[in-house]
Image (cartoon, rainbow, N blue to C red):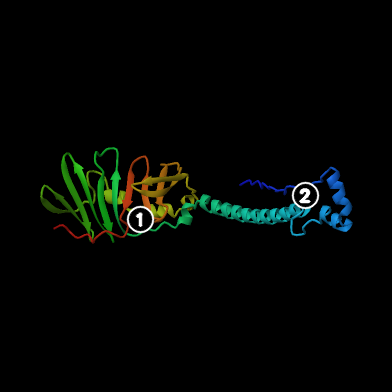
Amino acid sequence: MQRRRLLQTIAVGSSLAVAGCVGGGDDGADSADTSDPEAGTNETDEEPDESEPTDESTAEGTDEESDDSTGGTEDESDETADQTDEESEEETTEPTLGELEVAFENNYRFSVSVPQLGEPVTGAFDDGNFYSVVAIEGDTLRTYIVDGQQYIVADGSCTPVPSSTTGGMDVSSLADADTVEQDVANPESESLTPSGTTTIDGTRTYVYELETQDTPVTYYVGVESRRLRRVETQEAIIDYTDWGAVDPIIAPC
């Protein structure tokens, strides 16, 4: 709430006075005797010039001008304060997770960081197809799932395999945003208000913290994009980028 002071300054005009000079001596007396009495009276008792402002008129005029100017200033100050209050309320109103209406689609890149792996697992989803890249013991392992068939690419060879797991960890399930979308749509999650904001790689995000009996989870959602940017749990940190910008994923062999 802004507090305002209105300072008023009233200027008062300076007093004007007209003083006449009177001569002395015999010559002065003789002159007085020979002069026209009425003319002498007119010379010594001049009427004040009506065009010159008097003290009273100057002060009243200043008061009126001051009242007009200060009245306008007060109205403008009130309007400015009201606008500022409204803007401040809009800026401080932070949406719940449900009000954000987070936009999901099955086309995005991901990066999963887990404690047991030195390097993050990266990859992408596109309309049910999937691939991931992970470094294991100095080697790079690529896993693809295309039209339900899994492929392993390592040491320059490509092999179709029946299993859907890689290194004992189901990466496709871990990074699947469909699961996150269901969690975000949960009534308990939708009612969350942001604990603050943070910036991830230049993207300003809201921070929503959900305390559960199983595992606490934190969601990071873009302030402008309304896209999921990160999900953080005790087990992993999953970053989501390039929503809607992933090229079609095809079988490697």
Residue 247 image-quadrant placement: bottom left
In the figure, is residue 71 to the left or right of 114?
A: right
Tell me the residue that label 2 is attached to: 18
Residue visible at 89% across and 52% down?
A: 33
Residue visible at 29% across and 38% down?
A: 115
Choose between 14 and 50: the one closer to the eye.
50
Identify the element where label 1 is drawn.
helix
Q: Position of residue 183 (x, y in %)?
A: 41, 52
Identify the element where label 2 is drawn.
loop
Q: CA distance from mark 1 to mark 2?
A: 96 Å
Q: Which mark is residue 178?
A: 1
> How would you rate the neighbour count of disc 2 (Cα within 10 Å): few for under 14, some for 14-19, many for 20 or more?
few
Q: Position of residue 196 (x, y in %)?
A: 46, 44
Q: Nearer the viewer, mark 1 or mark 2?
A: 2
Q: Position of residue 193 (x, y in %)?
A: 49, 48
Choose between 63 and 136: the one closer to the eye.
63
Type of amino acid under label 2: Val
Residue 125 image-quadrant placement: bottom left
Q: Position of residue 113 (x, y in %)?
A: 29, 43
